[in-house]
């Protein structure tokens, strides 16, 4: 009789790998353990498949450990791209969104939308943004995008007429 193979039931291997790569302390421990194995005489080429990384990465880990100690095995925060709008400009945009209407700026709309905000920023500050980035800016300003609920005057008029008919004695409102 053969033995039953041990299996993971609720996660795929990709999900597990993703969870492991999110934890910086885990990443540090893996890198430290790879360095430990190099100190025992293992060659980086032998460790590539175990750590699912390149020979060059393992060499970099060893060099980082040698130069900066254990703390150097944690990746530094990457600063990202510089803001194209200053904080004052962002606060000015927030004030516009909260206190002004799009038609004050020549737009044919009663509510602000992402594309209108893109156009406003382009006109006022000569800065181009994509739609997705506009929503990131709103979040940074503490604002949220909200979908509007359509109000149709003709539907409202019909509802009022129906309510009047319901209140009239002896009349059916169907």
Image (tube, grey):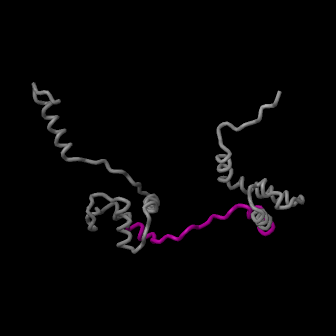
Read off the magenta span. 65-92
Choose top left, top right, bottom left or bottom right for residue 130: bottom left
Q: On the picture, is 128 further left or further right than 74?
A: left
- Is residue 101 shown above or below 5? below
Choose top left, top right, bottom left or bottom right for residue 29: bottom right
Image quarter in which the N terminus is found: top right
Q: On the picture, is 79 further left or further right than 145?
A: right
Taking the magenta stretch, the answer to whether it contains residue 159 is no
Q: Position of residue 83 (x, y in %)?
A: 49, 70
Taking the magenta stretch, the answer to whether it contains residue 79 is yes
- Is residue 173 shown above or below 110? above
Image quarter in which the C terminus is found: top left
Q: Position of residue 33 (x, y in %)?
A: 80, 55
Q: On the picture, is 5 further left or further right than 158?
A: right
Choose top left, top right, bottom left or bottom right for residue 107: bottom left
Q: On the picture, is 54 further left or further right than 103?
A: right
The total number of labels drawn is: 0
Q: 22 or 97, which is in the foreground?
A: 22
Outermost residue, top direction? 170
Outermost residue, front direction? 1
Outermost residue, right direction? 41
Q: Position of residue 87 (x, y in %)?
A: 45, 69
């Amino acid at each position: 009789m053969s033995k039953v193979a041990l299996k993971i039931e609720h996660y795929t291997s990709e999900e597990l790998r993703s969870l492991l790569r999110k934890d910086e302390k885990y990443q540090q421990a893996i890198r430290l353990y790879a360095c430990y194995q190099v100190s025992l005489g293992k060659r980086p080429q032998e460790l590539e498949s175990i750590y699912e990384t390149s020979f060059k990465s393992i060499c970099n880990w060893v060099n980082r450990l040698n130069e900066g100690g254990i703390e150097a095995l944690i990746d530094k925060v990457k600063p990202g791209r510089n803001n194209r709008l200053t904080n004052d400009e962002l606060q000015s945009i927030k004030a516009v969104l909260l206190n002004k209407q799009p038609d004050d700026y020549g737009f044919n709309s009663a509510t602000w939308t992402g594309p209108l905000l893109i156009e406003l920023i382009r006109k006022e500050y000569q800065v181009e943004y994509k739609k997705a980035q506009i929503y990131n800016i709103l979040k940074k300003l503490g604002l949220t995008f909200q979908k509007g609920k359509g109000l149709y005057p003709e539907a409202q008029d019909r509802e009022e007429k129906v309510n009047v008919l319901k209140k009239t004695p002896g009349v059916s409102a169907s």
